[in-house]
Amino acid sequence: MQAEKKPFQVAVAQSELDDLKSRLARVRWPNEPSDNEAWDWGTNLSYMQRLISYWRDEFDWRKAEMELNLFPQFTIDLPTIDETHTIHFIHENGSGRAPLPLILTHGWPSTYREFLDVVEPLAHPERFGGNAEDGMDIIVPSLIGYGFSSKPKSPVGPAKIAELWHRLMHDGLGYKRYAAQAGDWGSFVTSRLALQHPESVVAIHLTMLPLRPNLKHESQPPVTAEEADWIPKMKAWWAQEEGYRSIQSTKPMALAFGLMDSPVGLAGWLADKYWRLGDTRKDHPYTGMEQRFPMHTMCTQLSLYWFSGTINSANMLYKAGPAERSALLKPGERVTVPTAYSDYPLDVLPPTPESWGRRSYNIVRWREMKAGGHFAAMEEPKAFTDDVRDFFREIKC
Amino acid sequence: MAPEAFKIEISQSTISKIMERVRAFEWPDAPEGGGWAYGTELSTMKELVEYWLHSYDWYREQEAMNRLPHFKARVRDLDIHFIHLRSNAPKRRPLIITHGWPGSFVEFMNVMEPLAYPEKHAGSAKDAFDVIIPSLPGYGFSGKPDKPISPRTVAGYFDELMTKNLGYSNYIAQGGDWGSVVSGWLAYEGKGCRAAHLNMFGWRSPGVTAESAEEKQAEKHAEMLFNLEGAYFRQQSTKPLTLSYALMDSPVGTAAWIIEKFKGWSDLDNGKLESIYTKDQLLTNVMIYLVTRTFGTSTWLYRGLFEDTRGAPVPPKSRIEKPVGIARFPTDLIPFPPRTLVERHMNVSRWTEFKRGGHFAAMERPQDFIEDVRAFGSDLDAS
């Protein structure tokens, strides 16, 4: 049976908006340690108070809804042996004679909103001073358990999501050959997609390189000096930052009750990551943060999690991912599909050595970006668009 | 300054606001058939919340707590709350019992009177202790520090409470969880402390390493347990505030976060919480965090831990030389390794291994706990 896409519009009931407001109004704030200007102890209280008051009193969800609904959205039902997943996605047909289909996948703690500012420029370059022939068909799905995609009965990992993405692109939308772009969890899914379907995936563009080689295997060249320097840096970074990952990968349900009950709690949990991983300057508790992630954008992201009730199912990806063991390559396994990597300088993870990337990927282009952090398409939409468009133009030629 | 008598008096509006939120709670999805494998079990929480809404009575619990003599004393810059039971014996034998996270003085409700008044509880009058049960700074009815402080600093407050405010010069420090670290510090450098009785392996000095195969095996086991159970610690010791927004705002969220620890760290029959705990016990312990709004500050100790000694709870190669009694309960989060290894960390003068029991020993095995503390007191008197 051929799966068919059904049109979808974001429409949140007024009662949901009212309920959110009343929850935001009755917040109980925590005490903050006296020296938390740099968010050293966790999400800064003065930022949180500004954010929550904006979310409660100024944020216009109907405007956000309209912005989301400017793009054609759909759902598609994909049955598997375990259950039927419903995938939500934007599908914007590109300009030009032969637009290359491109699927962009977000990560955690993000949503499909991450790519909203780049959909039109990538689909219709001519509207932004570019060439219509560079237009691409843009597909932006919500990960399983995120936003308006369905919540799985039990957690689903990146390799399984990659299969669903292939079915969406190949069977659902009829694309025999397509490209993919992602960072964060999206990069796990996209890497798996390239590994599992090299016959269909033309090329991939990543802002994170999640696949790991099995260093013990004889096919692996010895660890370089740069890599030897980088590996402990990554470990040290994670030791400071792994709290959220550790909880979400071991006991997500211990956290779920609080995050599902408290929009303020949800905001505190997520805002911390935007601060740390984005180019937020970090010299003031909120100025750089609000410049980088305007209140309206932040509240749209938070509202998408809140209204869809998906923070728990989203966190579960940290349980499913490691359980699937799909990031560690088997001996001899490698992504053969042409891969571009773009390193955004202010993504705070220590920068990946190129040699490390080459162990697991067929890297055909390695680029250092000038500005931006972990949420590249939100932070630097123009640079992101140009970079992605350039790469896929080269591939098409 | 002299301590002042204190009563727990929580306003009806505070309780109503908490209960309104409990009532309005909407259940999250849980993976099908997940049980406790993903964290707090949905059905357990549903049952607990049902009881919380329809059968639990804060004021009944408050009255029971207020039958005990509570005090507050100014120590340095903070008010320290404590229960103080003076024995009927002519000889003063002070015992300070320190709770941990996510516990409170509620853990000791069933052991404090038998320890202070053994003559009324199937014991002998000579075993009587003056029992002092403080709330840690940032917990329960004690004051909240401005920023995270370390267990060593907490021990400083408690030593001052005992020696200056209460005038005890020769006390025994008892504790599990954070209480075991604080009590270790009291025994290590507290001016008035004569000995410690510990039911968790909290005092672990870096540089003292496992040697025998048995010791190494125990260390490996502890590491494995910590990998399974340690996520709360990783969060609370790095970004405590990031977690606090949710848990300060959501009573059911706080309950779920705390109850999961009682499930994970206790020795239960068939994994059933009610085989050991009543719902009243579990909820009153949670309510202490809620009515005092201390969930956030309670997690600060995990960061405070790293403030003094740079990443280690205790200084390198430092041994407690005062006598230490060890009560080893098998199902603890951080069970004691073989005695040989513990002895390199502290001067073990008594070692008791129990067949059952876990992290919350005074709640789980009150009689074993009482008898072991009494026996340790007698040992000390005889020496």
Image (cartoon, coloured by chain):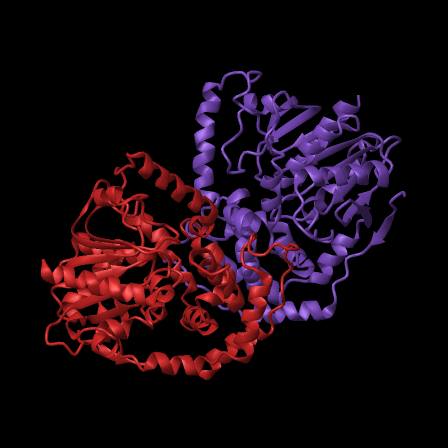
Question: Residue at the location (44% across, 42% down)?
Answer: B224
Q: Position of residue A70 (x, y in %)?
A: 79, 52
In which quadrant of the rendered view does residue B371 lie? bottom left
Q: Which tint is chain A? A: purple
> Residue at coordinates 82% horizontally, 49% vertically from top-left?
A77
Q: Position of residue A347 (x, y in %)?
A: 54, 38
Q: Is residue A303 above or below residue A23?
A: above
Which quadrant would the N terminus of chain B be assigned to in this image?
Answer: bottom left
Q: Is residue B192 visible?
A: no
Q: Position of residue B212 (x, y in %)?
A: 29, 34
Q: Quadrant of residue B93?
A: bottom left
User: Looking at the colours in the rendered structure, which chain would you say is drawn in red?
Assistant: B
Q: Is residue A37 left or right of residue B157?
A: right
Horizontal and vertical percent position of residue B161? 20, 67
Left or right of B20? Residue B119 is left
Find residue A11 and report its image quarter.
bottom right
| Nearer to us in this view, A116 or A188 | A188
Q: Nearer the viewer, residue A193 or A117?
A: A193
Determine if residue A373 is in view: yes
A129 relative to B124 in the view: left or right = right
Is residue A360 toward the left or the right of residue B144 in the image? right
Query: Looking at the image, is A49 positioned above or below residue B222?
Result: below
Figure quadrant of the C terminus of chain B: bottom left
Total numbered badges shown on the rendered structure: 0
